[in-house]
Amino acid sequence: MTSQFERRTAELGSAEQEPLLAGICRGVEKESLRIRPNGKLAQTPHPGGLGSALTHPYITTDYSEALLEFITPVSTSIDSTLQTLDDIHRFTYSHLGDELLWGASMPCIMEGDDNIPVARYGDSNVGTMKTVYRYGLGHRYGRLMQTIAGIHYNFSMPQEYWPLAQRADGNNADFEDYITQRYLGLIRNFRRHSWLLIYLFGASPAVCRSFLRDNDKHTLIPFDAESKSMHLPYATALRMGDLGYQSNAQKNLAICYNNLDSYVETLHEAIIQPHSAYEAIGTGEGAHTRQLNTSLLQIENEFYSPIRPKRVANTGETALGALRRGGIEYVEVRSVDVNPFQPLGIDAEQIRFLDIFLLYCLLQESQDCNDAERERMAENSSRVVNRGREPGLKLQTAQGEVSLQTAATALLEEMQPLAALLDRANAGNLHQASHRHQMAKISQPELTPSALILKQMKEQGLPFFRLAMSYSQRWAEQYREQPLSEERAAQFSSASSESLRQQAAIEAADIVSFETYLQRYYQQYDKLLKH
């Protein structure tokens, strides 16, 4: 009997559907710390020439004033996406003075929470809310964790695909509901198989000792006798483990992706229900506001997940409200490390495999997830994060344990036809080349970025900080030696100037107090379950 995956794959190869694969939409959000020439975190404000972090379309900040975030517009071209990201880097370097962009996920030399400046977004209510939210993160989890950088990859199918897919599936549901259910199926499958991406592309097997300044609960070991670097010998992506975007308070938060109602309800509950540990912190007031609320989550974004369902929100609208209004528009993959060997932290080969992987997750049958499976997924992720390249490593399945090599090979073999389809749609062979490279990493773990980082540290006698610093300096020189054309630089300068005007207009338009603004914002959550 033909499986649902085989049927959908065959349909995608039809004359009607295959051309649509060239219209996959994508965008990249890439974070980079600003650092001083000595490798320590920059203490300077967001550079004025980069415009307003609140309103600039391409350049903003994440947690810290020193944590830049570069955003590419939605594009159907991988080359165009990477070229825009490259342009943003070059424009940024023209306004950094002697500062550098740190080229790795795990941070540079850190000097404790007090030396991590929280991002500022001006005096408007929305800007104040963004800053207070970040202060809340610092009080809840510490600021050090918030300096870890990553890459977010946004993915969506072309709109023309969905009516064809719905007809082929024989589905009579509301059109928006059908799209949402298909994306939720993608998300469930992604969570089942995301350990594979961590193995293939994890690039954070070691950290600078300064990052662990006040942390005595880790299991890392010194890399060498000098102990300037801490690592695990078979680790892949420590960023995705207990040192990274994890929260003990959230471990029991069973967010359900089986349907949109369950997803909204479980996150809604976490946002409106007080949490005792955060009640102890208090909210404060005025200049001493400590957090937005005392709930388990201040807002949706505080929930740490390797993938999120997304819809572009209207001004002032909550993320959950946007999903409730129009369903899922795209997915945001959040498990990608910054690769220090790449000037942009990511390259076209990796993006091509991400497309193959996400397409596989979309087409494959996706059963609802239960508590037992959620536990298996968490355990598999932990094993690959900490021991991914360990010979003979086993992963959990409902049928028992299986070797990572066996499971990864089976997944990649199932994905191969999709690589071929993408190549035909794009008149090339680069997706299959990327697929072959990933397949080689299964039998040759020394080809993975995590293994290459530890290998270079050992061969060159460099601690993690020095290795990452050398690549950061190399990419900085490259960008400074080849600045943007005058025309392209003028376009970015115009965007910066316009962003400052927009911020000023937002500030001038505020007519209510911050307390009233926040109250009205949270009132939106009261309406979510009444939809």
Image (cartoon, grey):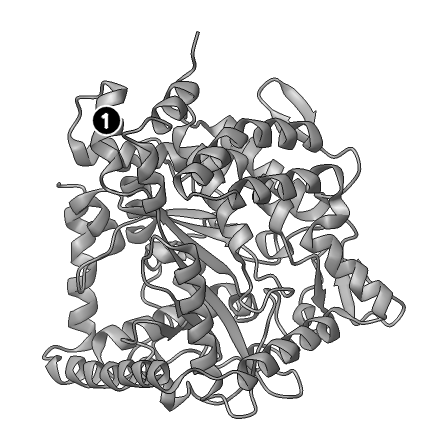
**x%, y% of residue 146?**
51, 67
Image quadrant in which the N terminus is located:
top left
Comparing 251 with 486, the one in front is 486
Q: Where residue 218 sits in the image (x, y, percent)? A: 70, 57
Instruction: Indicate the position of residue 490 as horizontal and vertical percent values.
Output: 32, 86
Q: Which residue is situated farthest in the top direction here? A: 1
Residue 299's quadrant in the figure?
Answer: bottom left
Q: Is residue 56 left or right of residue 196?
A: left
x%, y% of residue 22?
Answer: 35, 44
Residue 252 as seen in the image, left or right of residue 77: right
User: Is 107 on the left or on the right of 520, as rendered?
Assistant: right
Vertical side of 331 occupied by 56: above or below: below
Residue 531 can be seen, yes or no: yes
Say above or below: 518 vs 95: above
Task: Residue at 34% x, 33% y: name it.
Answer: 18
Could you tell me which secondary element the residue under label 1 belongs to?
helix
Q: Residue at x 34, y 60 (%)?
A: 298
User: What residue does disc 1 label?
Assistant: 166
Three-letter amino acid code at the position of disc 1: Gln
Q: Residue furthest right?
A: 225
Q: Residue at x 68, y 25 (%)?
A: 402
For the C terminus, the image quarter is top left
